Image (tube, helix red, strand yellow):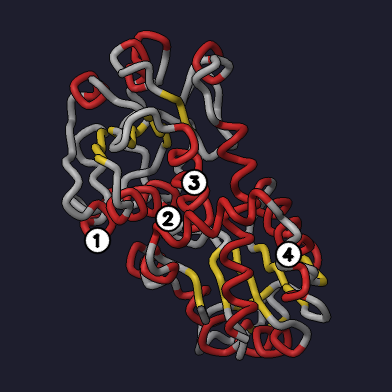
Amino acid sequence: MKSFINVEDIGDLRKALAEAFEIKNDRYKYQHLGKNKTLMMIFFNNSLRTRLSTQKAAMNLGMNVIVLDVNAGAWKLETERGVIMDGDKSEHLLEAIPVMGCYCDLIGVRSFAGLTDREYDYAETVLQQFIKYSGRPVFAMETATVHPLQAFADLITIEEHKTVERPKVVLTWAPHCRALPQAVPNSFAQWMNAAPDVDLVITHPEGYELDPKFIGNAPVEYDQKKAFEGADFIYAKNWSNPGVTNPADYGKITSKDMSWTVDTEHMSWTNNGKFMHCLPVRRNLIVTDDVIESPNSLVIPEAANREISCSVVIKRMLEAL
């Protein structure tokens, strides 16, 4: 596996899940693969779970790890071609990337959507430059439009906690005070659609439609209560307007409807449903205290599985070196 961005890169999901549970049972089984190998983790934006879980996964596999926070520990980087660099950016990404590649064997990149230029964000401009110029296998630690390590961890969590063979999983929009990217919901929808034994339903206010390439054939239900009925898992996440129905709305907050906040009443509509969220979460905007603290909340096991999903990805990349 030379790159990891979308669900297709992982191959057969049943095999990937089996590998995940094998690693979870013995996290150091493949320690020999990373001996004398180095992972470079590059962060263009803040991180807690991704930073910690990816570093832990690499260490479990015997790797050395270099962490670079571009905004705090490096020259400011220019990403556009043809720019006269007479401002505050001292180095171009096109020189920085191959230099980074000299010091490592694998590269993990975490970038972020600008939420002003949909075409630029959805072209994954920064990530694609790493893939093209680094000379190293590259995996996404969240990008402008996808977060595959999170979605893989979500699938592992659902597989562990499901009580029926084919659970109903609901991705629900929830309100937020800031404009957030669509990366997590995009990947969650993509991975749930690809999962062999999941029935996905997506619910959100009208106008918040995700890109069709991610939602696939999943039904979209604008009535949140109807969507929640009989659900086994509720995955709450805010996203800013994807600009699918109105490109001028891309990246904007076009709804702050607090009736979409997941509370006890919402969860009562489900089939004793489990609550999920990728974290960090704004309490009492996305979800109420009582729901996230309930026995049916899976946010901590879900976060713990980030180490496992990343371990599978890094293992496969090491095997391909």
Q: Alpha carbon of mark 4 to alpha carbon of mark 2: how far?
A: 31 Å
- Per the image, the residue denoted by label 3 is 156
Q: In the displayed structure, would residue 305 be above or below residue 54? A: above
The amino acid type of the residue labelled 2 equals Leu
Which amino acid, mark 1?
A: Lys
Q: CA distance from mark 4 to mark 3?
A: 19 Å
Q: Is residue 160 above or below residue 250?
A: above
Which structural element holds mark 4?
Answer: helix
Residue 300, x across and y down, in percent: 62, 32
Tag 3: amino acid: Ile
Specify the label residue 115 is tagged with. 2
Give the mark toward the camera: 4 or 2.
4
Give the structural element (helix, strand or loop) at label 1. helix
Give residue 244's mark.
Answer: none
- Closer to us: mark 4 or mark 3? 3
Distance in Å between CA atoms under marks 4 and 1: 31 Å
Give the amino acid at mark 4: Ala
The front one of 120 and 234 is 234
Whichever of callouts 1 and 2 sits on the residue coming sooner in the sequence is 2
